Amino acid sequence: MIIELDMQSDTPIYTQLINQIIEGIASGRLQPGEALPSVRSLASDIGINLHTVNKAYTLLKQEGFILVHRQKGVVVNPDGMPSVTPEFLEQQRRQLKSIIAEAICRGMTKEQLIDITGSIYSELMPDNNERGK
């Protein structure tokens, strides 16, 4: 698993780490049941504080993306991913609303926004398997 963090970004490091792990799962680069590095190992490998990795792993565990086993360590949830809930849909709506508002202010068209989201969706879907249909 290759993690690329932008230390100059306004986005907190733990959030960048969460996003990259979720992108890895969505794209199929990380498979259900696959082991992730330990907190200490990942922190050392990418040169960040172990508490930052621990925070990211804790939030991923709370959301159901990963499991922490005493013997197996940290693994991608082998029982499947969290489902779409009304709370998740509302959270996505709030996040997308500010992104779309900025795009509109910058002069993007609806078609450009749809093209970008479609392109990202296709990029992340493993083997172009549109499981969300």
Image: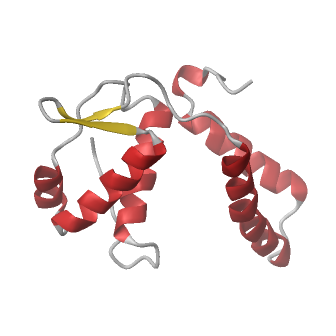
- Number of disc labels: 0
Quadrant location of the C terminus? Answer: top right
Residue at the image position 10 percent from the left and 59 percent from the top: 44
Residue 14 percent location from the top left of the image: 36, 64
Please indicate whether residue 7 sits to the left or right of residue 91 in the image: left
Which quadrant of the structure image shows residue 65? top left
Quadrant location of the N terminus? Answer: top left
Residue 29 percent location from the top left of the image: 38, 32
Pick the residue in front: 2 or 44: 44
Which quadrant of the structure image shows residue 121? top right
Please indicate whether residue 118 sits to the left or right of residue 4 in the image: right
Residue 98 percent location from the top left of the image: 74, 71
Pick the residue in front: 120 or 35: 35
Residue at the image position 57 percent from the left and 37 percent from the top: 123
Please indicate whether residue 60 sits to the left or right of residue 100 in the image: left
Residue at the image position 68 percent from the left and 41 percent from the top: 85
Indicate whether 13 appears above or below 28: below
Residue at the image position 46 percent from the left and 73 percent from the top: 11
Please indicate whether residue 37 sits to the left or right of residue 111 in the image: left
Residue 103 percent location from the top left of the image: 78, 69
- What colour-coding does the image apply? secondary structure
Pick the residue in front: 18 or 122: 18
